[in-house]
Image (cartoon, rainbow, N blue to C red):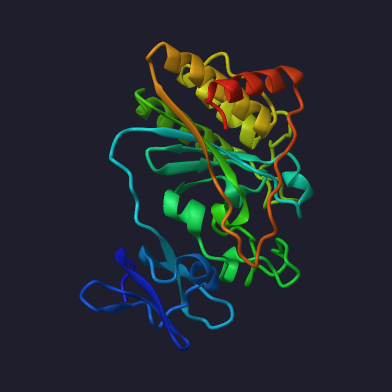
């Protein structure tokens, strides 16, 4: 079976789960399809492909499923503030990621989470195999043969706040972000903690500051912040000013968490900076930030 993308209706017949193509073809019936998909999408048209990883329980290849994209093909950038994961101390302030034309750049204290992902993997990867939480519900890599990364689709793990801009060239931002990733992987690894980015810091080289500095290099020099939600509000404020000049088009919205058994509800972090709180009130009144 190949790993090309196919589409069909998500169907279940007894123990068999598959995508049913428009011509009646059954796709993925011999593979591992996550129950979380059925909770939200049974009977709906989806895209899918087989991932290289296998399910720990059945040994079957894992299937990635996602809704049919409504992208128009125009260049865009989306900044994501991911609400905090309540079960992790390191997630106390939430998380930031950035999407450039469908490629999502993610930065973290964990090296395996410093990566470029497609939209479908970032938002909708199944909680199976290495992507799932361990039996105690947490991240666990104590067994390198069977790691539990607890890193499945982010929209199943959190509510995501989105600031989307169009109308500005994006190739330079993509180049900047790729350079940041290269810098991370060129950094010598601490042999005592090989799974961590050795130069990560909460106030420097974090998911927030790397993206902040990239946006500044791209031209938004007034963006400030060292924590995810603070930076997100500042970025929306900066994008808003550019949008009023007609230099970009801005929209701000939420991708609500898709509830599944493997993840508790995410939590919105408070606004810590009073100036950002005022900015948010102003944008709320204007209908910019909801």
Does residue 137 lie above or below 276 as drawn? below
Does residue 245 lie above or below 37 as drawn? above
Relative to the observer, which residue lies in front, 211 or 194?
211
Q: Is residue 169 visible?
A: yes
Seen in the image, is 30 located left or right of residue 154? Answer: left
Q: Quadrant of the N terminus?
A: bottom left
Image location of residue 211, percent across then percent down: 56, 30
Image location of residue 142, percent across then percent down: 73, 66
Seen in the image, is 24 located left or right of residue 52? Answer: left
Q: Going 34% across and 70% down the picture, which residue do you hit?
A: 9
For this orientation, the residue located farthest to the right is 89
Q: Quadrant of the C terminus?
A: top right
Q: Is residue 4 visible?
A: no
Q: Going 53% across and 73% down the picture, which residue do you hit?
A: 35
For this orientation, the residue located farthest to the top is 245
Number of labels in the image equals 0
Seen in the image, is 246 located left or right of residue 273? Answer: left
Does residue 210 lie above or below 244 as drawn? below
Q: Going 49% across and 21% down the picture, which residue do you hit?
A: 239
Relative to the observer, which residue lies in front, 169 or 72?
72
């Amino acid at each position: 079976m190949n790993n090309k993308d196919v589409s069909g209706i998500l169907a279940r017949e007894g123990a068999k789960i598959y995508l049913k193509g428009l011509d009646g073809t059954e796709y993925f019936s011999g593979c591992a399809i996550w129950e979380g998909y059925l909770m939200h999408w049974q009977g709906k048209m989806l895209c899918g492909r087989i991932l290289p990883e296998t399910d720990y329980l059945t040994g079957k290849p894992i299937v990635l499923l996602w809704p049919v994209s409504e992208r128009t093909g125009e260049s865009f950038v989306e900044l994501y503030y991911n609400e905090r994961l309540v079960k992790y101390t390191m997630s106390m302030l939430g998380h930031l990621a950035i999407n450039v034309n469908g490629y999502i750049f993610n930065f973290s204290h964990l090296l395996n989470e410093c990566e470029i992902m497609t939209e479908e993997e970032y938002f909708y990867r199944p909680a199976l195999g290495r992507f799932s939480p361990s039996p105690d519900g947490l991240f666990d890599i104590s067994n390198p043969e069977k790691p539990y990364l607890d890193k499945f689709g982010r929209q199943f793990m959190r509510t995501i706040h989105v600031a989307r801009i169009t109308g500005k060239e994006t190739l330079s931002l993509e180049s900047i972000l790729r350079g940041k990733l290269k810098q991370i992987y060129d950094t010598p690894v601490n042999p005592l903690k090989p799974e961590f980015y050795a130069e990560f810091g909460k106030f420097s080289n974090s998911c927030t500051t790397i993206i902040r500095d990239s946006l500044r290099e791209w031209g938004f020099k007034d963006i400030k912040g060292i924590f995810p939600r603070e930076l997100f509000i500042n970025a929306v404020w900066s994008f808003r000013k550019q949008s009023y000049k007609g230099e970009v088009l801005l929209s701000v919205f939420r991708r609500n968490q898709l509830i599944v058994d493997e993840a508790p509800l995410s939590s919105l972090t408070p606004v810590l900076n009073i100036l950002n709180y005022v900015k948010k009130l102003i944008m709320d009144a204007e209908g910019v930030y909801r």
